[in-house]
């Protein structure tokens, strides 16, 4: 079964719902972290942290986070050890986020991309898989520096 996590702050709920519908029509079971925040207006740090820690615990292989720009959720998600989140505002970056960087989370900015482009970006990211090869050593080096920073 294909599963995926998704979450958004109040600036990106409409685009999140569009992407969630797209995923469901493609056969994904979608878990929405948007309402896990403790307040009526979900704050991106709460949503991003909840989703990224679920990725860290391997409850999901991939997740999509949305806020106004995609920047804030990427910053928060990347604070979770072992998680790589990439801001994607075009299909090439989305593809490379997976193929070169093995990013488990993609982030989108609802104030940056429109719904149709967002769908294309999500589809490009979902279709891509980590290539390994020369990129494997680079991802291993990312992991090395992450662990060095935790010491």
Image: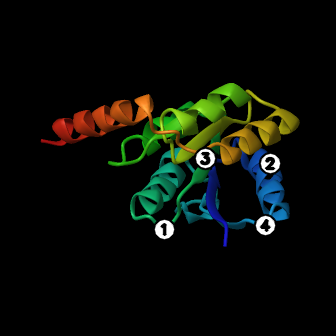
Disc nearer the start of the sequence (2/3): 2
Residue 61: x and y, percent? 53, 59
Q: Can residue 106 be seen in this snapshot? A: yes
Count neighbours of disc 4 (C-alpha within 10 A) and say few if under 14, some if 14 to 19, many if 20 or more. Answer: few
Disc nearer the start of the sequence (1/2): 2
Q: Which residue is mark 4?
A: 27
Count neighbours of disc 2 (C-alpha within 10 A) and say few if under 14, some if 14 to 19, many if 20 or more. Answer: some
Q: Is residue 48 left or right of residue 118?
A: left
Residue pictured at 59% horizontal, 45% vertical: 129
Camera-near label (1 vs 2) is 1
Residues marked 3 and 4 touching at CB (< 8 Å): no
Q: Which residue is mark 2?
A: 14
Count neighbours of disc 1 (C-alpha within 10 A) and say few if under 14, some if 14 to 19, many if 20 or more. Answer: some
Camera-near label (1 vs 3) is 1
Image height of 90 relative to 140, above or below = above
Which secondary structure, mark 2?
A: helix
Residue 106: x and y, percent? 59, 41
Residue 59: x and y, percent? 48, 68
Q: Which residue is mark 1?
A: 59
Residue 95: x and y, percent? 64, 34
Residues 115 and 40: in front is 115
Q: Separation of disc 2 and disc 3 at Cα?
A: 13 Å
């Amino acid at each position: 079964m294909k599963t995926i996590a998704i979450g958004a702050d109040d600036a990106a709920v409409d685009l999140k719902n569009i992407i969630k519908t797209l995923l469901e029509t493609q056969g994904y079971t979608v878990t929405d972290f948007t309402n896990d925040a403790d307040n009526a207006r979900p704050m991106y740090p709460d949503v991003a942290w909840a989703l990224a820690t679920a990725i860290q615990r391997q409850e999901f292989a991939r997740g999509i986070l949305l806020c106004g720009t995609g920047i804030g959720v990427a910053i928060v998600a990347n604070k979770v050890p072992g998680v790589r989140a990439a801001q994607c505002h075009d299909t090439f970056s989305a593809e490379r986020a997976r193929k070169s960087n093995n990013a488990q989370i993609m982030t989108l900015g609802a104030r940056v991309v429109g719904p149709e482009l967002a769908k294309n970006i999500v589809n490009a990211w979902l279709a891509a898989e980590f290539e390994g090869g020369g990129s494997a050593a680079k991802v291993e080096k990312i992991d090395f520096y992450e662990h060095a920073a935790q010491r």
